Image: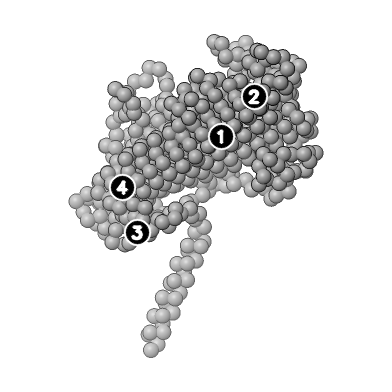
Amino acid sequence: MIFIIRQKVYWFVSLVLVVLLLVIGGEWFIARQGVAQTPPDRVFYVAPNGSDTNEGSLTHPWATVNHAANVLKAGETVYIRAGIYTPTQQIKAQNSGRADAWITYSAFPGEPVIIDAKAIPVGPPLGKPPFAHDQGAFQLENVQYIQVRNLEIINSHNSGITVRNSNYIDLNNNQTENTFSPGIGIWHSDHQKVIGNTVVNANALEMADYPRDSGKKPHEAISLGSVEHFEVAYNLVKYGQKEGIDIKEQSQHGTVHHNYVHHMDRQGLYVDSWFGLLEDVEVFDNVVHDCQGAGFAVSVEGGSAAKNIRFHHNLLYDNWGTGIFLSRWGDNGFRENVKIYNNTVHHNGYGPPNPGDKFYWMTGGLYLFSDNLQSIEIKNNIFSENNGFQIGYSDAYLKNSSKIEEVFQQKQIDIAHNLVFGANSAREPIYAGWPPDDYAYIYGTNGTSAVVGTSPQFINAKLGNFYLESRPTINQTDPIADPKTPQTTIGAFPYGEKPDLWWQPAEFPPKFSES
């Protein structure tokens, strides 16, 4: 009897300890509805001391992730043990999961896994795209219901992870570093989640596996091309040689939020139409700084149009180029129904000018360089201490009329209820641009119902705290811009709330796991 009681106490204490460990671990969980836990008999393992002729058990693991990708079936999980894996050929998933039986590729909990892709050969572009450099060291193509999490992929001569023509793919808490193409690239796919990943030094010219005379590098750090129903969130993107996050081509119905992007060689965030219509993209609660291009840009380089773009509650500061840029790049196609509200745009446009120029080639707070726009709202933002101007439009707007108010009315461009602090002259335009013929005279405008010349009084801009010390002298913010935001709120961060600098903790991105 005493033995039985002791045994029951032992099992109770063990259960309590397990629960405490799970709570103290503090992991974040984002679970898709319908993702089931994997039964123990359908869990397999890969380890550096394994063999692909083994059964794949914990004690007799496989040796390569390639083998796991060849044999995993719906409802199965592979845990990869700590180590550095050096595949000599692309890792490509051969089978799909199901809605009730996902396939999962994961590092073993608590163990670092590095896939060094430097030995995977990638030849020069031949024939029609997609080219070899458009693929990935880890490839998900024509598959569905697959999760990839907690893997680190380095030294890829193409992408780190590429998804093509695939649906219901989750990429969580992976890291890529030193890739010639994107760290993560997704094309022609539906229902994609890219959450909690870290992408470092993407689009690195030195990672090309063949001579590159032109110096051009393909795509962006995180690229989504013609993707529908997507979420790109809580990613860290830094020190890349092109743009940060690009939603492009004919992408539709997605969100980009809570990403931290810094020190990119071009734009931090980009929405860019090609090949057709791009629409219904919401970009919010992101932080972008120290990028050599714009903080955020919207273009139609080769598509028919970009419509229904919402950009709000973002912080853009200390970028070399314009904070928010509506470009003329490529075909300078049509953009309609773009809403830009409740952003904080501070100290942008101070990059080094070209010889003979006074300003960096793209400067200011918000720049309407293109006039191929219709139905644009710019409301409840803070524009402060940007170089040259705070809100500006190019001389293209004056080619048929000298009255900018009439032009804005015709195009339904509504600039209102913004706080404007810093140089912003309507009478003395600045001259800026880039050779050979993309220069323009840029005129400042405050719009209507603005607060002009009042410092926003950030708590500590030098430390990245752009919450407000006091309520701005503005009580006429426009609630129609965002009914969910308190009417007295201007800029990205509500006055009076405890500062939540979610991007600053050392443990960012947070840990996400699928249950």
Q: Which of marks 1 and 3 is nearer the N terminus?
A: 3
Residue 38's disc is 3
In front: label 2 or label 4: 2
Q: Which mark is residue 411?
A: 2
Q: Which residue is drawn at 49% across and 19% down?
A: 330
Q: Which quadrant: the N terminus?
A: bottom left
Q: Which of marks 2 and 4 is nearer the N terminus?
A: 4
Q: In whole angstroms, how far apart are the C-alphas of marks 2 and 3? A: 55 Å
The amino acid type, in three-letter code, at marker 4 is: Ser
**Residue 167, quarter of picture:** top left
Residue at which label 1 appears:
308
Q: Residue 375 at what x, y percent from top left?
A: 62, 29
User: How far across and how far down the image is residue 316, in percent?
Assistant: 62, 34
Q: Which residue is drawn at 67% across and 39% down?
A: 481
Q: Nearer the viewer, mark 1 or mark 4?
A: 1
Number of the front mark, 2 or 3: 2
- State the residue in front, 228 or 455: 228
Disc with the residue nearer the chain's start (2 vs 3)? 3
Q: For the residues marked 1 and 4, what is the alpha-carbon distance in whole angstroms? A: 33 Å
Helix, strand or loop under label 1: strand
Q: For marks 2 and 4, give the CA distance.
A: 48 Å
The residue lying at 32 percent from left, 29 percent from top is: 132
Please report whichever mark, 1 or 2, sits nearer to the chain's N-terminal start: 1
Residue that mark 4 sits on: 96
Does residue 3 sit above or below 168 in this rendering? Answer: below
Labels 2 and 3 touching (C-beta < 8 A) = no
